[in-house]
Image (spheres, rainbow, N blue to C red):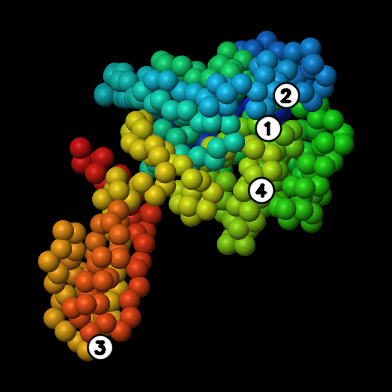
């Protein structure tokens, strides 16, 4: 039985136990709250199922079957499953924290890392899940994977309760935590992938096809025989992403997937994820502090702060919620006083440099009427419209929440 003792096992790819890694979460430097430390990652102890047993052993289906056989519906079967492929309803996670108040004395208080979050993610969606440090992002991901048990509310992933059936769910999900590797530290990448192959009982032909594709698109060819401990952070991240996808997961959780990558590598990873979603319909939940990842990959974004969902909708809608402004840069024939317009729009001149002027107006408003008025009343030479910086919008939302 691979499981049993918590002290000697750590979670391998997508929640499968592995030997040789510390499970003491005090070594983790990238958690949402310090209170998450100390949580064990061992799967076998709680599920009573041997690590690495494939879906066939659990469901009666053949090896490598990890979709319909487990939930009773294959991919795409049943509108209800597709519409609410991931469902959270009033999800809560409360930690008890003890703080020393004096010699031999301490007090206990509750920390609500996740506070009543509800949302649904449809099959095949790519959703950005963003928030400041300590907002509850990683805690949510850990509950979605079954690593943590919710304190309240409910959640289902592909019809499965993660905390009750973690091993069953592990064959349907892939997970990448930016600061924690799911690879074997002293083994070359190739051997780590072979272990993933055996643990998930991936059919040989499918494993070779998936590995060849990941190696090519993530540029891992020269790294396959290099021990993981000798890889740079960016190289290891690419290796982790490949490991999470070798068993064809239906859901992919990515926590800071482009951390440590250079510009070229980031572009490759983003392109790879777009193709993965388009070709295979993989559902992706992405948490990141690099908002360029969100802009290029996700049509929907959720913003979380202090454990509560602040926004859930289209990326473009963030500008309206955050009361952001677009900038109209106007070049006139000669230097003139600041432009003043009688308009229903809240237009203001924010900067003047010689014949060039910068005018701010609400991001939700059209620039066309404003441009027409300026062209009719001023000697216009050229103009351009600059979209608001998404990072500034998010920062403004965080600041507003902190001041509440």
Residue visible at 18% across and 78% down?
377
Pick the front one: 129 or 122: 122
Question: Crowdedness of circle 4 by 10 Å Cα count: few (<14), some, many (20+)?
Answer: few
Disc 1 target residue = 249
N-term mark: 1 or 4? 1
Distance between the Cα atoms at labels 2 and 4?
Answer: 21 Å
Give yes or no for contact between labels 2 and 1 (Cβ–Cβ under 8 Å). Answer: yes
Question: Crowdedness of circle 3 by 10 Å Cα count: few (<14), some, many (20+)?
Answer: few
Of badges 1 and 4, the one in the foreground is 4
Residue visible at 27% across and 71% down?
371
The answer to whether 67 appears left or right of 364 in the picture is: right
Question: Crowdedness of circle 2 by 10 Å Cα count: few (<14), some, many (20+)?
Answer: many
Q: Quick one: SS at disc 1? A: loop
N-term mark: 2 or 1? 2
Residue 321 to residue 155: above or below: below
N-term mark: 2 or 3? 2
Residue 349, percent across and down? 19, 70
Of badges 3 and 4, the one in the foreground is 3
- Determine which of the numbered discs, if any, sits on residue 333 in the image: 3
N-term mark: 2 or 4? 2
Disc 2 target residue = 66
Residue visible at 82% across and 22% down?
63
Quadrant location, the N terminus: top right
Residue 221, percent across and down? 79, 54
Residue 177 to residue 103: above or below: below
């Amino acid at each position: 039985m691979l499981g049993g003792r918590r002290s000697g096992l750590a979670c391998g790819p997508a929640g499968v136990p592995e030997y040789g890694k510390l499970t003491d979460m005090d070594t983790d430097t990238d958690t949402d709250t310090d209170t998450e430390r100390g949580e064990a990652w061992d799967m076998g102890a709680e599920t009573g199922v041997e690590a690495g047993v494939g879906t066939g052993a659990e469901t009666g289906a053949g090896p490598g079957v990890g979709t319909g056989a487990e939930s009773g519906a294959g991919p795409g079967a049943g509108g209800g499953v597709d519409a609410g492929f991931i469902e959270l309803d009033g999800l809560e996670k409360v930690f008890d924290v003890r703080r020393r108040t004096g010699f031999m004395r301490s007090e206990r208080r509750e920390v609500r890392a996740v506070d009543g979050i509800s949302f649904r993610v449809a099959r095949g969606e790519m959703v950005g899940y963003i928030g400041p440090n300590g907002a509850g992002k990683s805690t949510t991901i850990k509950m979605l994977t079954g690593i943590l048990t919710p304190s309240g509310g409910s959640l289902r992933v592909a019809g499965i309760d993660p905390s009750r059936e973690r091993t069953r769910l592990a064959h349907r999900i892939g997970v990448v935590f930016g600061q924690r590797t799911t690879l074997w530290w002293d083994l070359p990448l190739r051997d780590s992938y072979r272990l993933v192959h055996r643990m998930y009982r991936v059919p040989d032909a499918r494993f070779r096809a998936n590995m060849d594709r990941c190696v090519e698109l993530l540029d891992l060819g020269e790294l396959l025989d290099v021990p993981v401990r000798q890889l740079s952070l960016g190289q290891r991240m690419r290796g982790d992403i490949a490991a999470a996808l070798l068993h064809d997961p239906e859901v992919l959780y990515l926590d800071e997937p482009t951390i440590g990558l250079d510009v070229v590598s980031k572009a490759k990873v983003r392109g790879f994820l777009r193709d993965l979603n388009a070709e295979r319909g993989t559902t992706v939940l992405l948490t990141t502090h690099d908002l360029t990842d969100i802009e290029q990959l996700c049509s929907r974004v959720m913003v979380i702060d202090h454990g509560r969902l602040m926004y859930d909708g289209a990326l473009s809608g963030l500008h309206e919620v955050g009361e952001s402004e677009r900038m109209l840069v106007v070049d006139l024939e000669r230097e003139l006083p600041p432009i003043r317009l009688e308009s229903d729009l809240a237009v203001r001149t924010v900067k003047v440099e010689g014949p060039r002027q910068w005018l701010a107006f609400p991001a939700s408003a059209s620039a066309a009427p404003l441009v027409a008025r300026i062209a009719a009343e001023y000697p216009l030479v050229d103009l351009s419209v600059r979209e608001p910086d998404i990072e500034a919008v998010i920062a403004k939302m965080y600041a507003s929440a902190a001041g509440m």
